[in-house]
Image (spheres, helix red, strand yellow):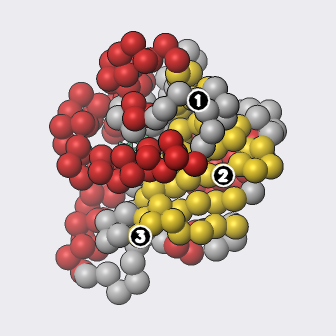
Amino acid sequence: MEKNKNFFNIYDYLAPIYNLLFKWFLFKSGSLVASHVNKIIKPNKIIIEIGCGTAYQAKLYKRFKKIILLDPSSRMLDEARTGLGNKAKSFVFLNIPAEELLLEPNTIDFAIFNHSLNVINKPKEVINTLLKILKSEGQIIINTKLKEKNENIFIVIINKILGVFLQYDSNFSIDFFKEYNHEILFKSKFYQIIIIKK
Ligand SMILES: C[S@@+](CC[C@H](N)C(=O)[O-])C[C@H]1O[C@@H](n2cnc3c(N)ncnc32)[C@H](O)[C@@H]1O
C-alpha cells in the first residue's frame, strides 16, 4: 500500500474513537447508500470509495469485481482493515488524498463519497478527474450535508464550529452540483444523496 506522509489530517487522531463518536449520526445514511449501491451496481463492476474512513459502509457492500478504498489518513485505513477483518483481503487500499488520484481514463464504474466530498480541499478538481476516470455509464454517488438556504442561526454556528474541528466546508451547497449532470436521489434534513452522471 502506498503511504502518504505529508498530510495533516484530524481524522488520524479521531480514528480510534471515530466509530464510537459518529455511529448514531452518520452510519444510518451510510447504510442507505450501501443498500442503494448493492441494488443498482452489478457484481462485475469496479468501484472506488473516496474518504472511506473506517469502512463501516464498505463492510456492507456485496462482492464486486474490485473495490478500491481511498483515504489519506493511514489510521482511518488501519481501523478500516481491522473492521473489515477477513474481508479486507478483497479490497485495495490507497493511502492518498483524492487530489492525488491518478488512474487511466475509463477504468472505474462507480465512485462513492460518504460524508467526504465536503472534507476534500479541491472537490471540483476531484470530481472533474473522476469524470475522466469513469467509464461512459459511470456514476458518482455522493452522500453529504448541504447548506440549506435560510438555515437556522443555531445550526449555522454549530455547523461552522464542527466544520473547523472536522475540516469540512460548512458552506457546501447544492450550487456546487449545478455544472454537472446531477440528480438528487434522497433528501433529509441532515443529509442528501446526489448522483452525478457522466
Ligand atoms: C467525515 S469522514 C467520513 C468517513 C466515512 N466515509 C464515513 O462516512 O464515516 C471524512 C473522511 O475523509 C477523509 N479525507 C480527508 N481529506 C481527504 C482528501 N483530500 N481526499 C480523500 N479523503 C479525505 C478523512 O480522512 C476521513 O476519513
Secondary structure beneath dot 3 equals: strand
Q: How far apart are marks 2 and 3 (CA)?
A: 18 Å
| Residue 188: x %, y % from top left | 35, 69
Q: What residue type is labelled 1?
A: Phe
Residue at 36% across / 46% down in the picture? 31
Q: Do the residues labelled 1 and 3 touch (CB within 8 Å)?
A: no
Residue at 47% across / 40% down in the picture? 51
Please tell me in which quadrant of the rendered image residue 191 appears: bottom left
Specify which label sits upstream in the sequence, 1 or 2.
1
Q: Which amino acid does label 2 sit on?
A: Gln
- Which residue in the protein does label 3 denote? 187
Secondary structure beneath dot 2 equals: strand
Image-based side of 168 in relation to 136, left or right: left
Specify which label sits upstream in the sequence, 2 or 3.
2
- Give whichever of 106, 137 is nearer the camera: 137
Residue at 29% across / 31% down in the picture? 15
* Quadrant observed for ligand 1 in the rendered image: top left
Q: Is residue 167 visible?
A: no
Please tell me in which quadrant of the rendered image residue 8 appears: top left
Q: What residue type is labelled 3?
A: Lys
Of the 4 image quadrants, the one containing the N terminus is top right
Specify which label sits upstream in the sequence, 1 or 3.
1
Q: Do the residues labelled 2 and 3 touch (CB within 8 Å)?
A: no
Crowding near the residue tagged with mark 1, few <14, some 14–19, many ≥20 C-alpha atoms within 10 Å: some
| Residue 28: x %, y % from top left | 29, 51
Crowding near the residue tagged with mark 3, few <14, some 14–19, many ≥20 C-alpha atoms within 10 Å: some
- Which residue in the protein does label 1 denote? 64
Residue at 20% across / 49% down in the picture? 24
| Residue 186: x %, y % from top left | 45, 66
Q: Does the residue labelled 1 lie within 8 Å of ligand 1?
A: no
Secondary structure beneath dot 1 equals: loop
